[in-house]
């Protein structure tokens, strides 16, 4: 019966990561729309931030395994 | 007319790729009868495919039937394996081949009162309840048992501790496993790609415009230089770290891509192996620490905080240097392993539901995830290199304003 709490925990981690990456993506879109010439820099920064958040979410998932 | 031909060829290509993703999985169907839940079987199958192995499974599987009373019968065995060398260090070097382990014994599931099923072999040894097979082999006069892809000494049978884990001693295992062979293959591919180009630069220099393979590789080399090394390490110091960053980028990328090939030379899960990613991250850690300058070490051991906080801050800063490679390890490992598991799980829907109609859903979804994994393979290689460059950049950065 340890699988259900683990699944809930993994799900919560993924929800958090989804919200975080969604916010970053939205903000990056806005930034690019306002300043299309900075698209490259914004994308790089976005990917780094998304990777860091994703890392935390993956910790959650791996621990839940 | 041309328009239609173009579309037909596209459809054929997509269908072919879809078939390629499903065939190797279809071949390993397990016929399940009775009441034993097949999701457990499926789980064991998927975990077997994402983990390392002492022999290279190419095609087919032992088809087994699980009877209603919980016992297993082998219906047919069509599995083809390539035996890989087994190298053990056990009071001196012991060499062998994994064919020495080919006497695979089948164990029997027995219903137990409390927790589902207990696995017992024909001798009545209780084994862990998520594996069907173990193999006993003799190498250089010593008896070993291969169980869950771990090799144990096997003189008088298996012994278990109170938690049900095997307590037999283990020799040091330096075998060329599936992952090692796959990694050597990727090294070979990289050498074959890069050496001719490097030789050309050595001979002619940068006099002529690049052509052919040189042109193709230059895109990625320039990408690593202009998008990763220069912005993160700085114009002045990046040159020294380019060989390392390029190596790590191409090595991670090629291993990710080989893992996406669903049949023989591919399909191994090298970059989804935590030992592999941990070693790469550890090398990044070493490079970062050894290139750390005065400012970097000052930030660790004399942080700009009141002296009373030093007992807290210094351990935190030291742990902070260690969490970075740890995060690198987990990120690559979890991303690649998750990709493999998702594709296999979509294929598994067909066998779990025991209905071919599910292929209409699971094959397109499996194809979609496979294509998405192509992007992830590149992205993870990029992020690993990018974060390595970022960590090195923080270590070599000079703070003029202090």
Image: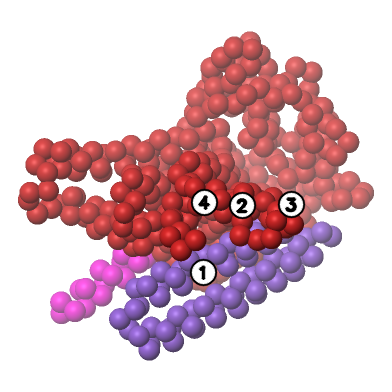
Name the subunit of mark 1: A
Q: Is residue B369 visible?
A: no
Question: Of marks 3 and 2, which one's residue comes earlier in the chain?
Answer: 2
Residue furthest to the bottom in view is A34
Name the subunit of mark 2: B
Q: Residues within 10 Å of mark 3 (few under 14, many from 20)?
A: few
Q: Is residue B199 visible?
A: yes
Find the distance from the CA under tag 1 to the CA under tag 4: 23 Å
Instruction: Chain B: give its colour.
Output: red
Q: Residues within 10 Å of mark 2 (few under 14, many from 20)?
A: some
Find the distance from the CA under tag 3 to the CA under tag 2: 11 Å
Question: Of marks 2 and 4, which one's residue comes earlier in the chain?
Answer: 4
x, y (%) of residue B320? 62, 54
Question: Of marks 4 and 3, which one's residue comes earlier in the chain?
Answer: 4
Kindly state the secondary structure of the residue where label 4 is placed.
Answer: helix
Specify start and end residues of the magenta stretch as a single range.
Answer: B1-20
Q: Are marks 4 and 3 in contact (CB under 8 Å)?
A: no
Q: Are marks 2 and 1 in contact (CB under 8 Å)?
A: no
């Amino acid at each position: 019966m340890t699988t259900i709490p683990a699944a809930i925990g993994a799900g919560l981690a993924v929800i958090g990561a989804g919200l975080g990456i969604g916010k970053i993506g939205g903000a990056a879109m806005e930034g690019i729309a306002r300043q299309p010439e900075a698209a490259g820099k914004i994308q790089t920064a976005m990917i780094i931030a998304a990777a860091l958040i994703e890392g935390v979410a993956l910790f959650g998932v791996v621990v839940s395994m | 007319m041309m328009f239609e031909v173009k579309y037909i060829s596209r459809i054929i290509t997509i269908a072919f790729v879809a078939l390629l993703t499903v065939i190797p999985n279809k071949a390993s169907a397990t016929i399940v009868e009775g009441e034993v839940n097949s999701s457990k079987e499926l789980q064991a199958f998927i975990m077997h495919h994402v983990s390392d192995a002492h022999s290279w499974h190419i095609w087919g599987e032992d088809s087994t039937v699980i009877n209603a009373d919980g016992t297993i019968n082998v219906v047919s065995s069509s599995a083809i394996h390539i035996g890989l060398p087994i190298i053990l260090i056990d009071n001196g070097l012991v060499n062998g081949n994994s064919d020495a382990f080919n006497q695979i014994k089948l164990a029997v599931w027995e219903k137990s009162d409390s927790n589902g099923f207990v696995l017992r072999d024909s001798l009545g040894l209780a084994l862990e309840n998520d594996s069907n097979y173990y193999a006993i082999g003799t190498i250089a006069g010593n008896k070993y048992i291969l169980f869950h892809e771990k090799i144990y000494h096997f003189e008088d049978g298996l012994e278990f501790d109170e938690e049900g884990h095997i307590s037999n001693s283990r020799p040091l295992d330096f075998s060329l496993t599936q992952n090692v062979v796959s990694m050597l293959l990727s090294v070979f591919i990289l050498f074959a790609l890069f050496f001719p180009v490097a030789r050309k630069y050595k001979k002619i220099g940068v006099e002529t415009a690049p052509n052919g393979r040189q042109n193709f590789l230059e895109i990625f080399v320039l990408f690593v230089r202009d998008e990763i090394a220069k912005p993160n390490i700085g114009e002045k110091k990046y040159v020294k770290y380019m060989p390392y960053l390029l190596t790590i980028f191409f090595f991670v990328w090629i291993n990710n891509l080989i893992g996406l090939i669903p049949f023989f030379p591919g399909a191994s899960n090298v970059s989804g192996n935590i030992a592999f990613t941990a070693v790469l991250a550890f090398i990044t850690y070493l490079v970062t620490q050894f290139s750390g300058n005065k400012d970097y070490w000052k930030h660790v051991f004399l942080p700009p905080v009141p002296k009373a906080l030093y007992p807290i801050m210094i351990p935190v800063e030291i742990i902070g240097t260690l969490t970075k490679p740890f995060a690198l390890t987990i990120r690559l490992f979890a991303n690649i392993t998750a990709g493999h598991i998702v594709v296999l799980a979509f294929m598994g829907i067909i066998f779990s539901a025991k209905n071919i109609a599910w292929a209409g859903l699971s094959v397109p979804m499996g194809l979609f995830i496979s294509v998405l994994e192509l992007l992830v393979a590149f992205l993870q290689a990029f992020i690993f290199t990018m974060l390595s460059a970022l960590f090195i950049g923080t270590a070599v950065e000079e703070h003029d304003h202090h």
